[in-house]
Amino acid sequence: MDPRLDVSNAGVIELLAGWFESCGFTVHTELVAAQPRKLNLIATCGTGAGGLVLAGHTDTVPCDASAWLGDPFVLREADGFVHGLGVSDMKNFFPVILEALDGLDLSRGRHGCTVIATCDEECTMNGARHLLARRQCLGRYAMLGEPTGLTPITRHKAVLSLAVGVRGRTGHASDPGLGVNAIDGMFEVLRELRAWRQNIRSGWHDDDFVIPYPTLNFGRIGGGDSTNRICGDCELQLDLRLLPGMDAVAVCEELDRLARRAVLDTGCTAAVWPLSAGTPALAPAGDSELVRFCEHETGRGADSAAFATEAPFLAALGSECVVLGAGDIGQAHQPNERLSLEQAAAMTRIVRHAMERFCLRP
Ligand SMILES: [Zn+2]
């Protein structure tokens, strides 16, 4: 999100384009943003209505190189692991796919195989939003190779970042009548939001999640500039995690209504607005052959994740989605990120079997 750290992903997209072309894929890239240059890659092999999408993102979070034992940008292998920025989350998926392709006869194609590499998953999900805007289903089944430690994931919560602004009127601190204090107004808003949080916690429940209720976290607050001045403006930033089935737009409208009502007697005004476009929830698409396949291959039942992914965007295009990949989300976004080569090998076998099952003629 910091423009000083934001760089183009064109280099990695060009590398992937060359590799997938040499495997017989037809590659095309789409411009998502011009400055810095952000691209999505869509590589297809074969046609046919069923089809498998293998999707991942090419970006990583920023890193503090001084906290790493080695250079985060140089892959280092030791003790059955590879170390480097993004090895778990989630650059391993592309070499896993390339390795899985090795030895497969793609001329036996029955349904298409599509590889997608997006930009900007870690910040705005603009790559996935760009795919959604094309309104074209890319395949009946989609596997997203995020680091799930080889557990198939079929659900996660929606994530929303909102701001609540309260506006009063500034004045000299010596006389409360000279202004309207926005912090006092925010106090009333917080009281309403805490009561609302309690209500949704008892009103919504889904045992398929480790935290089985929707959450509201107050993440940041700021206002005023001096002790001797009545605070004129106060802003609160919050994070909402909604269960599948909750209507994000309705929730935002309700919070806006609550905030406005809370300050009615204070002389302040209040409003709620989104800080970003948010990520929808992921819920399983009924009985899916891909989910059953992944459960069988991994020996593990489908589970929920505590993190959001690009899967809801592919699901909105009509694909049945599973998030499944090598690597540990606990390792992601950390110094000394690493990936177990044993897991990568296991994932390679799963991807090869998935291509055989969903793309190739028996
Ligand atoms: Zn990721």
Image (spheres, rainbow, N blue to C red):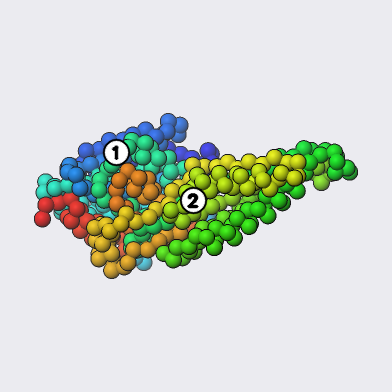
**Identity, as a three-letter code, of the amino acid under mark 2:** Val
In the image, 246 versus 147, the foreground residue is 246
Specify the label residue 159 is tagged with: 2
Residue sitting at x 28%, y 69% = 299
Q: Is residue 45 left or right of residue 275?
A: left
Asked whether residue 231 appears in the rendered view, the answer is no
Callout 1 crowding tier (Cα within 10 Å): few <14, some 14–19, many ≥20? few
Report the residue marked by disc 1.
136
How far apart are the two marked residues, 2 and 1, measured between alpha carbons? 24 Å
**Residue 350: image x %, image y %?**
25, 60
Residue nearest the viewer, comparing 351 with 300? 300
Identify which amino acid the numbered label 1 is placed on. Answer: Gln
Q: Outermost residue toward the bottom?
A: 299
Depth check: 120 or 345 in front?
Answer: 120
Is residue 11 placed above or below 195 in the rendered structure?
above
Percent coordinates x, y for residue 185 in the rendering: 73, 46
Tell me which numbered mark, 2 or 1, is placed earlier along the sequence: 1
Considering only vertical position in the picture, is 307 above or below 112? below
Mark 2 neighbour density, 10 Å: few (under 14) some (14–19) many (20 or more): many
**Residue 264 image position (x, y, % from top left):** 71, 44
Q: Residue at x 19, y 53 (%)?
A: 358
Q: Residue at x 75, y 45 (%)?
A: 265
